[in-house]
Image (cartoon, rainbow, N blue to C red):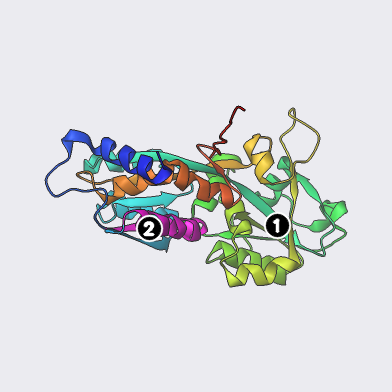
Amino acid sequence: MKTTGLLLWILVVLVGCGKQPGSDIRTGALQVLATDAYLPLMQQEAEEYHRIYTSAVVQVLGMTTRDAIVQMINDSAACIVVDRPLNAEERAAVQGAEIRVVETEMASDALAILVHSSNRTRSLSAETLAAIIVGKLADWRAVPSSKLSGPIEFCVTGRNSGLYELLTRVFFKPEKEVVPSFVAPSQSDVIAYVALHPSAIGVISYATWEDTTQPKGRWFKKDVRLLDIQPKEGKTEEAVKLNQNNMYDRVYPLIYSIYIYTSEKSPGVAQGFSTFVASMPGQKIFWDAGLVPKTVPYRVIQLTQE
């Protein structure tokens, strides 16, 4: 059985006999709200889904993580793609709104730490990075390997972004509010800022670093580079390079999961699209983008005997 035929069979079975009148995972329109780092990837997913199911049209819009979640809770969005799970406050709001939300982990990504190409630092420990983020370490002279002096300019996206919450609620959990030197409108703008400011250090997703669809990112990448990160004390003394292999092996210390949430009242395109993203054809798109899909795609090799 071909992959496309098998996928169609799986999607139909998932709806099953409980399918309600008028609902169809293969027909209709869906608007997906995706955090900016995954907008290009989800547009690829939508195009492939439409290629297989020509009567289903999926439009993907970019939005901050917080705004996408709020729209789902307010019943204004049936499908969102975000870079963190719902927090306790948001899960309580979902229960209060009495909406049925289905959470699906799609893939793993990681925080990428970047500096200007003139910065001689090749790696940072997790402790040093945390000190920079919270402002305890504010001058490059405290990082002798940088060969720089002067204030460290920390750049990240805003408080409504999943990236900001990953930094402050998951990986480092500072006691006081993090106040960046520059709040970037998007992750591509973080790359641009660091490229133009030799004293800057920025945080983006690896998906954004690997993305080749954003002209701004491509233009400025020649003036920035990624740092290796040394895990927290007690694990290893060696700094780890950020790449797909080290993400797959779970040795890079700043790995996180990407999620797709659906909140349809009855099975429809949102459920079909979510199922497709979790299937082998959908997971291959993440793999090809340099991320680590939840289900690693495999290639079937036909063995013959003479």
Left or right relative to 91: residue 200? right
Q: Is residue 173 visible?
A: no
C-alpha distance separating marks 2 and 1: 37 Å
Q: Is residue 33 left or right of residue 78?
A: right
Q: Residues within 10 Å of mark 2 (few under 14, many from 20)?
A: few
Q: Secondary structure at mark 2?
A: helix
Q: Reply yes or no: does residue 43 show up in magenta.
A: yes
Q: Nearer the viewer, residue 44 or 75?
A: 44
Mark 1 crowd level (few <14, some 14–19, many ≥20, 10 Å Cα): many
Q: Quadrant of the N terminus?
A: top left
Q: Number of callouts in the render?
A: 2
- Camera-side residue of 3 and 221: 3
Q: What span is colored magenta in the figure?
A: 29-53
- Above or below, 49 against 245 in this view is below
Camera-side mark, 2 or 1: 2
| Mark toward the start of the polypeptide (2 vs 1) | 2
Residue sitting nearer the eye, 70 or 34: 34
Decide whether the magenta segment is chiefly helix, strand or loop.
Answer: helix
Name the amino acid, label 2. Arg
Q: Position of residue 174 (x, y in %)?
A: 59, 43
Direction from residue 289 to residue 161 in the image, left or right: left
Does 142 sit left or right of 111 as displayed? right
- Residue 4 part of the magenta segment: no
Q: Which residue is mark 2?
A: 51
**Percent position of residue 126, x then y:** 71, 41
Q: Locate residue 279, reporting x and y percent.
A: 43, 41
User: Residue 114 got which mark?
Assistant: 1
Q: Quadrant of the C terminus?
A: top right
Would residue 10 be seen by someone viewing this image from the given angle? Answer: yes
Residue 241 figure quarter: top right
